[in-house]
Image (cartoon, rainbow, N blue to C red):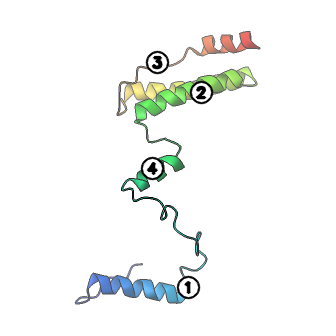
Amino acid sequence: MTERKPAGLSFESWIDRQIREAQDRGEFDDLPGAGKPLPGLSGPHDELWWVKEKLRREEGTALPPTLLLRKDAADAREAAGRASSEAEVRRIIGGINDRIAAAIRVPLSGPPLNLMPFDVEHVVEEWRTRR
């Protein structure tokens, strides 16, 4: 919408007109969820409903960047243990090491990182031992 609000017309009237014209053109037809009730209307009023919904949708990724990197590092270590080849172990550990090194060079917000890059050769040796 690039049309500007005409002078002398209230914003409410201008917006209402744009919505009505869009409805007339059918621009709101076939939207996802059309005709379905809004979720959460039957429950008790909760001012933070949208925060809880966002956390549920994003599976708790609202962590500070340093804690998220620690979680990703632990996940990468587990993934390396399940890897099917030595090259895959090196790729997984190399990728998380790059992120850790970048966070050390340019600190992230949140609690202290307290994380050093993994010793790739040590992780590969552990992987071989478990095979």
Foreground tag (4 vs 3):
4
N-terminal of the pair, mark 2 or mark 4, is 4
N-terminal of the pair, mark 1 or mark 4, is 1
Residue that carries the numbered disc 3 in the rendered image: 116
Residue lying at 69% horizontally and 15% vertically, measured from the top left: 127
Residue that carries the numbered disc 4 in the rendered image: 52
Residue 59 in sight here: yes
Instruction: Give above or below for 107 relative to 119.
Output: below
- The kind of residue tagged 2 is Ala
Foreground tag (1 vs 4):
4
Residue that carries the numbered disc 1 in the rendered image: 26
Cα–Cα span, label 4 and label 3 = 33 Å
Cα–Cα span, label 1 and label 2 = 48 Å
N-terminal of the pair, mark 4 or mark 3, is 4
Instruction: Give above or below for 95 relative to 32.
Output: above
Residue that carries the numbered disc 2 in the rendered image: 76
Q: In the image, residue 63 lies at what x, y percent?
A: 43, 37
Describe the element under mark 2 as helix, strand or loop: helix
Structural crowding at the residue carrying mark 4, measured as other residues with C-alpha within 10 Å and reported as few (<14), some (14–19) or many (≥20):
few
Describe the element under mark 1 as helix, strand or loop: loop
Cα–Cα span, label 1 and label 3 = 56 Å
Quadrant holding the N terminus = bottom left
Residue extending farthest left: 8
Cα–Cα span, label 3 and label 2 = 14 Å
- Whether tag 1 and tag 2 are in contact, CB under 8 A, the answer is no
Describe the element under mark 3 as helix, strand or loop: loop
Q: In the image, residue 76 lies at what x, y percent?
A: 59, 27
- The kind of residue tagged 4 is Lys
What numbered label is drawn on residue 120?
none
N-terminal of the pair, mark 3 or mark 2, is 2
